[in-house]
Amino acid sequence: MTKGENMPTTSEKTEAASEAAAAESRETGSTAGTAAGTDAAAQPAGLLGRIESRFPRGLVIRLIAYLFVGHLFAFFVYLLFVLGGQNQ
């Protein structure tokens, strides 16, 4: 047998893994009853939902806060230079 013959490709592996995960979620959903329904309802939809599914909520909040504070500090330094330049 040659190398790669009858071997699944990466996309086939991913599809098989996603199908297995879907089958597992259906099985757990049928045994868990209402718990699966509340988990699905708890997931936020849209862009925010995708971001929160990839990053922890605390990280997102800190990132937004640091960006806001960083820009506020940069504006303050810029303002100092502008006002200092007018006094010369």
Image (cartoon, helix red, strand yellow):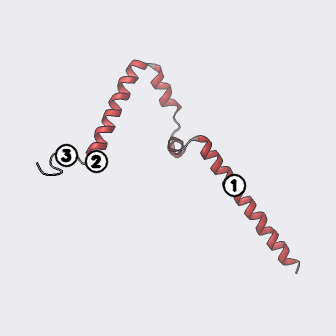
Left or right of 85, for residue 25: left
Residue ID at (59%, 41%)? 57
Reply above or below: 43 against 80. Answer: above
SS for dot 3: loop
Write down the quadrant of residue 29 in the picture: top left
Write down the quadrant of residue 88 in the picture: bottom right
Residue ID at (47%, 30%)? 40
Give the x, y percent position of residue 33: 43, 19
The residue singled out by tag 2 in the image is 11
Distance in Å between CA atoms under marks 2 and 3: 12 Å
Looking at the image, do the residues carrying marks 1 and 3 touch, with CB atoms under 8 Å apart? no
Residue ID at (31%, 43%)? 14
The residue singled out by tag 3 in the image is 7
Reply above or below: 42 against 86. Answer: above
Query: Which disc is residue 68 wearing?
Result: 1
Q: Earlier in the sequence, mark 1 or mark 3?
A: 3
Give the crowd class for mark 1: few <14, some 14-19, many >=20 residues within 10 Å.
Answer: few
Which tag is nearer the camera, tag 1 or tag 3?
Answer: 3
Reply above or below: 3 against 36. Answer: below
Left or right of 80, for residue 14: left
